[in-house]
Image (spheres, helix red, strand yellow):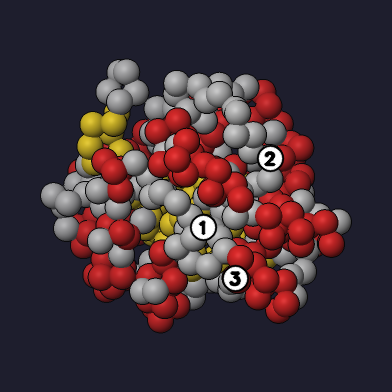
Amino acid sequence: MEHRTLGRSGLSSSALGLGCMGMSDLYGPADEQTGIATIHAALDAGVTLLDTGDFYGMGHNEMLIRDALRTIGSGSRDKVQLSVKFGAMRDAGGNWIGMDNRPAAVKNFLAYTLRRLGADHIDIYRPARLDPSVPIEDTVGAIAEEIKAGRVRHIGLSEVGADTLRRAHAVHPITDLQIEYSLISRGIEKDILPTCRELGIGITAYGVLSRGLISGHWDPSRKLAANDFRSHSPRFSADNLAHNLALIDVLRSIAADKEATPAQVAIAWVLAQGSDIVPLVGARRPERLAESLGALKLVLTRQDLARIEEAIPANAAAGERYAAHSMAHLDSEK
C-alpha cells in the first residue's frame, strides 16, 4: 500500500481511505455484516484511514466501526487512523436540524464518540460544516484543548473556504481539509487547494466517484430508495442525469485501453492531482472496494490526463453537487 503524508502535519495515511457513511446511512438499505466485511478487507489491503461522522446513522456508523475493529484482535487500533466529523444535529426522525460547533458541544460530541468507538483518542477530529453562529477560532480552540488532553491527535476541517482555513490555521495547525473533489467537482482548484498547499494542509477528497455517477456502474433506470439522498441530488435529476453520464465516455475509452474500469480511471485522476491528496472511497461491499484499490496500480500518462481534461473540463457537470438548501451551508461555496 502506498502512503501519503497529509500536509505538513507528519500524519502518514494510506493513499486511499475508506469512507464508511454509506454502510449506515443516506444511500438506501445497507447490510451491517457486509459493511464490517468491507472494513476488514480494507484493513487487510493496507488501508489505514477510516472516515465517519457521529451523525452517520445517528451513532450507528461509529458502533459499526467499533465492532469491525474489535473482531480483528488487539493492537488493531494502533494501525488505524480514525477521522470523525461532528456538529450536525438530527431529530428522532433523522431530520437535519442545524449545526452546533460551540466549545461545550465539541467536548460533548467527542465524549460520546469515544464511547461509541470504544477508543481513547480520535486521530483527526473535525466539524462537519461551519457553524455560522460560532467563530471558527472558538471551535478549533476547543479541539486544541482536547489535543492537550490526549483525546485528539489532529484537527481537520470540512467544506470550508480559504478565509476560514487561514483563520483556523492561525489558532492551531490544520492537518487536512475534507472536501468533495472529483472530475466533475473541481471547485477547490481556484482558491481552496492553493491555500491548503500554501499552509501545508492536506486534502482528503470525498465524492471521487460523485456518489456512483461517474463509476461506470450507474444504471439510469435505477430506482432510488426514499432514504437515498441521491434522489434529491440535482446531478441525478432527469434533466441532468443523461448529460452527466455521457461525460464518462472518455473514461470508458481509457479504461478499455488499460484493462481497467471507469471507476479506477476516475480515482486515478484524483490521485494524480497531487501527493498531498488522499481520496476517500465510499465502497460498501468488498468487491467494490477491490475495484477501487485497483486504481493504485493504474498509471495515467500526460496524454491520458490531457484527453480527460479535454472531454471533461471544469464545470462540465449539469446541476449543483447538493440540493439548494444544503449548498447554502457550504462555506466552501461562498
Q: What residue is disc 2 on?
A: 217
Q: Quadrant of the C terminus?
A: bottom left
Residue 257 placed where, x, y %?
A: 84, 62
| Mark 2 residue element | loop
Q: Judge the density around disc 1: few (<14), some (14-19), many (≥20) Cα neighbours within 10 Å.
A: many
Residue nearest the observer in this picture, 128 or 151: 128
Amino acid, disc 3: Glu
State the mark number for residue 309.
Answer: 3
Amino acid, disc 1: Ile
Q: Residue at x 76, y 59 (%)?
A: 253
- Is residue 104 in view? yes
Q: Judge the density around disc 2: few (<14), some (14-19), many (≥20) Cα neighbours within 10 Å.
A: few
Q: Is residue 294 left or right of residue 313?
A: right
Q: Residue at x 54, y 34 (%)?
A: 22
Q: Quadrant of residue 12?
A: bottom right
Find the distance from the CA under tag 3 to the CA under tag 2: 21 Å
* Above/below status of 327 relative to 224: below
Residue nearest the observer in this picture, 317 or 55: 317
Discs 3, 1 touching: Cβ within 8 Å: no
Residue 14 placed where, x, y %?
A: 65, 59
First-in-chain label (3 vs 1): 1
- Is residue 153 in view? no
Q: What residue is disc 1 on?
A: 184
Find the distance from the CA under tag 2 to the CA under tag 1: 16 Å
Residue 239 placed where, x, y %?
A: 45, 40
Residue nearest the observer in this picture, 286 or 234: 234
First-in-chain label (3 vs 2): 2
Q: Quadrant of residue 147?
A: bottom left
Amino acid, disc 2: His
